[in-house]
Image (tube, grey):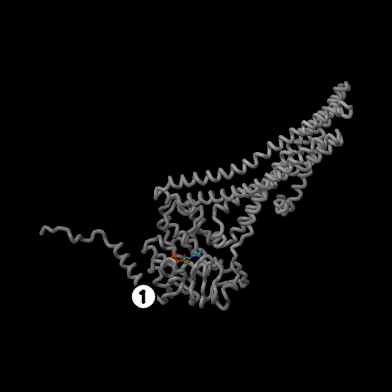
Amino acid sequence: MFDVLVKLKFYFKENKWQYLGSIIALAVSNIFAVIIPFIIGRFIDAIVTGEMNAAVLRTYSLQFAGLVIITYGLDFLWGYGLFAGAYKLQKEMRSKLMRHFLRMRAPYFEKFRTGDLMARGTQDIRALADTAGYGMLVLMSATGFTATLVIMMGLTVHWGLTFAAVIPMLPMAYVIKVKGAQVDEAYEIAQKSFSSVNDDVLEMIDGMRVIRAYVKEADFIDKFKEQTSGLLKKNNKVSEIAAIFAPTVKAFEGLSIMIALSYGAILVAQGTLSVGDIVAFQMYLGMMIWPIISVSELVLILRQGSASMRRVDEIRYATDELNFKGTIEAEQVDDFEFDEFTFKYSSSETINLDKIRLDLKKGKTLGIVGKTGSGKTTLIRQLLNQFPLGSGTFNMGSSAYSEYNDPSLRRLIGYVPQDHVLFSRSVRDNIAFGKKEATDEDILESIRMASFEEDLKNINRGLDTMIGEKGVSISGGQKQRISIARALIKDPDILILDDSLSAVDAKTEQTIIHNIQQVREGKTTIISTHRLSAVKEADEIIVLDNGAILERGTHDELIDKGGWYYDQFTKQEIKELTENEPLSSPDPYERRDD
Ligand SMILES: Nc1ncnc2c1ncn2[C@@H]1O[C@H](COP(=O)(O)OP(=O)(O)OP(=O)(O)O)[C@@H](O)[C@H]1O
């Protein structure tokens, strides 16, 4: 349970002065707070014994007012220190997580679902901050304040009475311990369920258009109801177990008060204690309610904090298990060589790249085609270091690809993925993302190359048009072309287009490919595509089938071969021709009245 505080040690250390100041202010405030009942006790004794007069009244009133003012100031100091510190912890933990996410590659995000990561990054980190802020407060109250009260009760009233009143708290501590473990378990189950609901909500919002198109709203509402009811049940379970804490504490506290009153009455009758002592003692017991209840809260907060810490640590220390240890700084792209290169995804039953042999000379264009699932993206992912490198030879220049430093390789690559990712920023910012110091001229030039010029004229605010979340306010083809412009502005040593022209018409595709070829003269380009006309001009085309190279050659060589490429190309040409056939073609069945 206390492990969470140990794990947060780094944070307490970093902010030691803030925490030390808060803890000292809280401790001093607690000491002053316990002096108040003592003064009231003496005040009552002065009334009972008839010693009260104007001077005594003034002295007690001034002492009382002084204590109230001092504790007011101290309470402000520790309150600000502890709770501002908790916000700071949230900020730091979230920044740590974000830095970790940014370093992770595909296998990590396959391991954890987005909603789960979000839940841990928000709700669990909030629980940790509660532990560092409110948790520290209750820890101090439950320990320091309780101890101060017990000492004050013993020293100023009666040790025997103090121990008699404190005895019922021991079985209470045991009940709290047992129930605390159950809360821990139930809380972790509820958090898991929250992660799963979160994930499904994200997926639902993402897929809203498909859900509506298939009129599946009712199904989703039912599913969501079922999930939230499940979550509610789990949260109720936590509340149910936690609800036992407060009544348990109150029952034992009632017992304490009863013992204090009965035994106290005997001690007053024996003349050992004064009436003022009994009043002060009852006030001390009353003041003990909060620290005693806070024992139960402390258990709850520490248990929840500890479960949340485990959940946050799990995603913080999990890695993508990709160990790229290369040290050579890749300054420019060189020739690529694959020989007997084989790769299999860890979760795949079959080989995904099978004995690939390929030479891609620097400055040349490679076309990768093949039916869906044949391994086109998988081959590209090897260049992007997104998965562990396969076995066999994979060199760039005279060194193995694995010997190069990974960030230096990524700096050379311009990549346009299949699922074009745009940010909720302006068109300008989305394109300038590819080049830090891009001017508007650079941006407009890359827009021209990506054939987005006409579209830009038609969107309301030109370069300043905001693209909604994931670019929802523009069409799929427009998104693809903005993604291409973003890659082109980088003018990368190697440009990789992974089926990035699927949503544009054949004519626009030809224009873009032509522009790319012109501007990238002497630079390496890889184009993976389903539409074979996109790779017609490539220096070499490989046809993949089940991860292996089925055919290779230039467009003309592959056409001459008469294999898969020839069949596909012919089919696509016929389709293209029929789709573009003029609508005004004569109807053969039209009656002629001649
Ligand atoms: N992360 C992954 N884990 C396990 N198997 C995968 C993974 N990604 C892809 N595969 C499998 O690897 C094979 C090749 O997939 P890949 O995405 O490379 O095909 P592709 O030729 O690019 O297909 P498409 O043209 O449809 O994009 C497929 O059988 C696919 O199911």
Looking at this view, is 519 or 421 the one in front?
421
Q: Secondary structure at mark 1?
A: loop
Based on the displayed image, in which of its 4 quarters is residue 107 positioned? bottom right
Query: In this picture, is 365 found above or below 208?
Result: below
Q: Residue at x 88, y 22 (%)?
A: 49
Which percent across, then down, holds residue 216? 42, 48
The crowding category of the residue bearing disc 1, from other C-alpha atoms within 10 Å (few below 14, some 14 to 19, many at least 20), is few
Can I make out residue 63 in this image? no
Q: Is residue 286 left or right of residue 353?
A: right
Q: Is residue 461 left or right of residue 287?
A: left
Can I make out residue 37 in this image? yes
Which percent across, then down, holds residue 482? 46, 59
* Quadrant placement of the C terminus: bottom left
Which percent across, then down, holds residue 137? 73, 43
Based on the displayed image, in which of its 4 quarters is residue 388 positioned? bottom right
- The residue to which callout 1 is attached is 563
Q: Is residue 436 left or right of residue 455?
A: right
Q: Residue at x 75, y 47 (%)?
A: 19
Which percent across, then down, holds residue 475? 42, 55
